[in-house]
Amino acid sequence: GESVGLHLPTLSVQEGDNSIINCAYSNSASDYFIWYKQESGKGPQFIIDIRSNMDKRQGQRVTVLLNKTVKHLSLQIAATQPGDSAVYFCAENSGGSNYKLTFGKGTLLTVNP
Amino acid sequence: NAGVTQTPKFQVLKTGQSMTLQCAQDMNHEYMSWYRQDPGMGLRLIHYSVGAGITDQGEVPNGYNVSRSTTEDFPLRLLSAAPSQTSVYFCASSRDRPRNTEAFFGQGTRLTVV
């Protein structure tokens, strides 16, 4: 079946550095790719999404890059802060189905002061 | 602004018991979904609903039932709990807009089946 996966399960960075979290996907028919942040004991929280016809989208301190040639998605966090420590999931949906997300396994980001 | 509210937050069940996990949203969202999250894994879709009176199965529906009698509520029922259903359960809601992909999640229900 189709799947969304991650290259690295854990990432440790120093406060102030930039972080890059990677994700591989296999469903080339997906319309949107989305990044979620999950803090300990909480539900996932939407960060940013990118439509499949784009290759880059920027938000506040975050940038998502999409490379459809190699089916790769990345989330860049600028000037990483301790509050960014969390598990980050990439997810995909197809056909505008917001109710039917396929999640990757997640990357644990730890920010060291 | 409550968002998505799940109850209970924690629950311990004995094998074979039944229970209902509650989910309510106050954002008038058309779409609602249930996911389970197991250690070291992403979230997997159990059931979803695109509107009141309409439900469908997700990736891992066995052992669970749902109903959607109102826009606000989407309860998840475990008919006969099994240890394999030990997990953290998340309810999510979202709008019916092709350009809006944001799903709002509840705080989760941590279920242990012994």
Image (cartoon, helix red, strand yellow):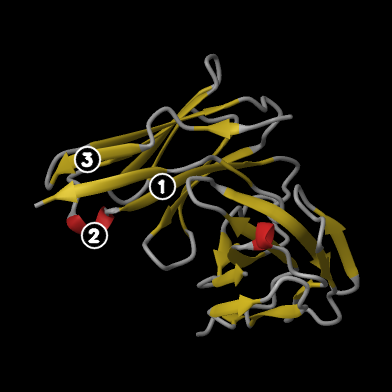
Q: Is residue A69 shown to the viewer in this render?
A: yes
Residue A56 in the image, given as x and y percentages of width and height: 43, 32
Which numbered tag is attached to residue A83? Answer: 2
Q: CA distance from mark 3 to mark 1?
A: 13 Å
Q: Which sits earlier in the primary sequence, circle 2 or circle 1?
A: 2
Q: Is residue B3 shown to the viewer in this render?
A: no
Q: Which residue is mark 3?
A: A12
**Which quadrant does the N terminus of chain A fall into?**
top right
Residue B22 in the image, given as x and y percentages of width and height: 68, 81
Chain letter for mark 3, please. A
Residue at x 27% of width, y 54% of height: A84
Please indicate whether residue A98 sits to the left or right of residue A103 in the image: right
Task: Indicate which label's residue lies in the foreground, 2 or 3.
Answer: 3
Report the amino acid beneath label 1. Answer: Tyr
Q: Residues within 10 Å of mark 3 (few under 14, many from 20)?
A: few
Q: Which sits earlier in the primary sequence, circle 3 or circle 1?
A: 3
Residue A90 in the image, given as x and y percentages of width and height: 50, 41
> SS of the residue at dot 2?
helix
Q: Which residue is mark 1?
A: A88
Q: Residues within 10 Å of mark 1 (few under 14, many from 20)?
A: many
Chain letter for mark 2, please. A
Report whether mark 3 lies on the same chain as mark 1.
yes
